[in-house]
Image (spheres, helix red, strand yellow):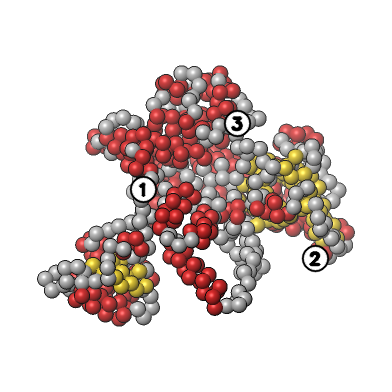
Amino acid sequence: MFAFLLCSRILMNDSKIDMVMAILVIRGRPQHQAPNPAPNWLSMRTWQDMLSLSTLPTFSNLPESFSKHESAFKSILYSSHTCREPLPGEWDSALDSFQNLLVLRCLRADRLTHGLQDFVASQLGQNFIEPQVPTHIEVMKFSKKMSTISLGQGQGPSAEAMMHSAMEKGQWVFFQNCHLAPSWMPSLERLIENIDPDKVHRDFRLWLGSLPNNKFPVSILQNGSKMTIVPPRGIKANLLRTYASLTDDFIISCTKVPVEKNLRLSSCLCVFSLEFTDGDLHICISQLKMFLDEYQNIPYKAKPDNYYSDYSLMHTLFSPLHIKIIEEIVKGIVEKIPSLINVQEGVNKYPVMYEESMNTVLVQEVIRYNKLLSVISRRLSDLVKALKGLVVMSSELELISNSLFINAVPELWKAKPLASWVSDLVQRISFLQNWISDGIPAVFWISGCFFPQAFLTGALQNFACSSSVSIDIIAFDFKVHNLFSAARVSSELTEGPEIGCFVHGLYLEGARWDAETGQFAESRPKELYKEMAVIWMVPVPNRKPPQSGIYVCPIYKTLTRAGTLSTTGGHSPNYVIAVELPTDRTQGHWVKQGVALICDLDY
């Protein structure tokens, strides 16, 4: 990404590319709505991105051209070399290589990285996309005599003595992890300020290693040479560097890259992502040798986890102001955000009843969404006042402002593209308003619930009350109705079941539901998320789950999967429930693919 930013800035200064297009490649653009001409194979997000791109003059005819060359665009979408496929019709000759990136971002955002690499290589050269990034160990090979100490509690005197010795003998000193010793940083600053170049050995060098930290002395940064060591991204770059740096059996290092790659795939493979550095690699090798040579048995067992980024001065001066753009975005959001739901109307129409727990669930959902709507309205109002200078711009308002400017949802609200998030919120409020006006729905949109766990508990409580059974011995059984589209669901399921509830609005990640066989099936190409059929959740007392022929599929509220564990039950609020669905494969097959049901996608 840095190489692309550098390249695009050079081209901007040469007036070869437009800044608006450069921003569009990185950030995207607010989405637009129009019917999808090919819903069978083209995702709605891809089509919306193409509509957004058509707002630029160069791409104004893109939607019409797509309908004319639909088969050609489909072949590009499913190609294994999408970034190098020629565009159909006049687009291949009309667009330059940079404009091709915009189309690539719409069709295959997952291949944009490869497209950026090809673009940078064609403009600046191959060396700019294959940097040789040295680790600190490789840098220190230039020193014949080098002393290293990892800073921490109580290491200050030892580090100071090591530094004085190195200044006399002309050695190199490396202080690692300066961010772990913030209290000693003022002493280090004084030591460096007192260094007399005339009295210090000419070969003396002081190296300091630290993560970004606001307590690191500014004077040291200003007076010293700075080097940023960033590990290469991707399996290929990691393997090339690891193979080149190890002189012993490099097979040992093969476990490093997949573990490090889990950081990107953490939502599918593990709930909590962990950094894995070169230092961790060498420590693992040392510990492995120690366990093999000194221990007969492994002294402990692994415990399972409980849960799953100028043109010129005049151009800058006359560009649209940051403030004006944000004010327009805020105005558009305010126009779309619905008003607060009348809580009293819901309470009067659906009073708290022992026989119907869903009344309580509805009122609680209305209260939660009203709080969210109030927070959004209040923050947007405060932001407009802050932009006009009427109130102080707090750090929270500044974060909201920056997020809106780049078409992202503020962290305090939700992790979703801004336009999609607003549209999704409107649908959720509409779902609750229809519930209040039309009565309990026959099929529940579980993704529209603020707290779906409470909804499922309400379904169990209803059964417990009607059957005079303790809720502690009740569990759900799961049956799938092969209905997918909202139109078919509303037309064919007009009444709810006698017991339990119908739910829809879930998405399968890593697999799909085969309506013909009535079980899990492998995902089709380019289908990461697939809509799940309606699930009938049937409360059953003293239920014994099947031991085979099923996959215990977890349901999560968001794609992140991880969440903060509660202090009471030890459960993540992002985890909803696990459903047992039929399959002819083993449980381990779907576990390795990270298959899960998701309530809310990130677009």
Amino acid found under the numbered disc labelled 3: Leu
The reply to whether residue 92 is in sight is yes
Amino acid found under the numbered disc labelled 1: Pro
Q: Is residue 470 above or below residue 153?
A: above
Amino acid found under the numbered disc labelled 2: Asp
Rounded to the nearest angstrom, the CA distance separating label 3 from label 1 is: 36 Å
Choose the circle earlier in sequence order: 3 or 2.
Answer: 3
Q: Residues within 10 Å of mark 1 (few under 14, many from 20)?
A: few
Q: Considering depth in this image, is 193 or 321 the residue closer to the camera?
A: 193
The quadrant of the picture occupied by the C terminus is top right
Nearer the camera: disc 2 or disc 1: 1
* Residue wearing tag 2: 472
Q: Secondary structure at mark 1?
A: loop
Residue 131 is tagged as: 1
The reply to whether residue 375 is in sight is no
| Left or right: 70 in relation to 231 | right
Say which residue appears at 31% left-offset and 61% top-offset.
139
Picture coordinates of residue 21 (x, y %)?
Answer: 39, 33
Q: Secondary structure at mark 2?
A: helix
Nearer the camera: disc 3 or disc 1: 1
* Residue wearing tag 3: 42
Choose the circle earlier in sequence order: 3 or 1.
Answer: 3
